[in-house]
Image (spheres, helix red, strand yellow):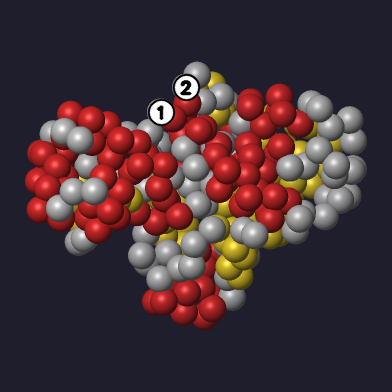
Amino acid sequence: MSQTFRHPEMLEIARRDGKVTVDGLAAHFGVTLQTIRRDLTYLAEAGQLERVHGGAVLPSGTTNIGYEERRVLNSSTKQAIARTCASHIPNDISLFLNIGTSTEAVARELMNHRNLMVVTNNMNVANILVANPHCEILVTGGSLRRADGGLIGNLAADTIRQFKFDLAVIGCSALDADGDLLDFDIQEVSVSQTIIRQSRKTFLVADHTKFVRSAPARIASLSAIDTLFTDHPLASELATSCESWGTTVAYAS
């Protein structure tokens, strides 16, 4: 198979898994390690991947992956994480769901929950939960981000400050080795920080691709999160930090 055909599939694997390895790609395509290294160098020089030890990851930067691409990226994994998260959400509570495809997946798993008051700054979450007649839905104000249906800015944060939520479920664009939650939009970061402050408990839903990405703006530390729901084991140092912070890590079944 020529590189013309390998490169698009390499990028698709990277988008699906968040990372590609030299060994894995060589086995997948039936070519030598040297061939894969040349391919990855070419893709890195073209700005489509970033080389890391043993492979490559999607490029970090100052802009997020497009919403439609994020919506389908690791969709089955997000669904499994969302199902596990939803199993820890009780009935009869006030709940905040913020912007992101992972929190939208959680919303889809709440169809059988009863007596929820859900506040959200995500128009997609509101539209999903319309199908649950036992769910009261409140939407914050704010500037509408047309790309993904998110409501951001001071008006969104001001609305959130009117509440004290029993529980918030949030997402992030990246999660670094220090345990910092990161995002791209500083206005969204400000809203997420307000959500955490106004919630008695906070859950984070983040699949393994978030651990190999980067974003410029810091939301908070995992130390501010009660439970992280993810799909892959954490690096040992971060797992030790979570234990010392009292942050529970729950893995999707």
Q: Are marks 2 and 1 in contact (CB under 8 Å)?
A: yes
Placement of the C terminus among the 4 image quadrants: bottom right
Task: Give the side of residue 93 with respect to residue 11, left or right.
Answer: right
- The residue sitting at 89% across, 43% down in the picture is 114
Is residue 201 visible in the rendered image? The answer is: yes
**Which disc, if any, is residue 66?**
1
Tell which circle, 2 or 1, labels the residue nearer the N-terminal end. Answer: 1
Seen in the picture, residue 234 relative to 38 is either above or below; the reply is: below
- Give the quadrant of residue 85: bottom right
Q: Amino acid at mark 1?
A: Gly
- Seen in the picture, residue 175 relative to 113 is either above or below; the reply is below
Q: Is residue 116 left or right of residue 228?
A: right
Q: Secondary structure at mark 1?
A: loop
* Residue density around tag 1, few if under 14, some if 14–19, many if 20 or more, within 10 Å: few
Mark 2 vs mark 1, foreground winner is 1
Q: Position of residue 214 (x, y in %)?
A: 32, 49
Viewer-nearest residue: 239 or 170: 239
Q: Amino acid at mark 2?
A: Ala
From the top left corner, tell me how far across and down residue 76 is, in percent: 57, 43
Q: Position of residue 184 (x, y in %)?
A: 38, 39
Judge from the rendering whether residue 135 lies leftward or rightward of residue 3; answer left or right: right
Q: Nearer the viewer, residue 36 or 70?
A: 36
Neighbour class for label 2 at 10 Å: few (<14), some, many (≥20)? few
Q: Is residue 194 visible?
A: no
Name the quarter where the N terminus is drawn: top left
250 sits to left or right of 9: right
Q: What mark, if any, has residue 122 been given in the picture?
A: none
Give residue 147's mark: 2
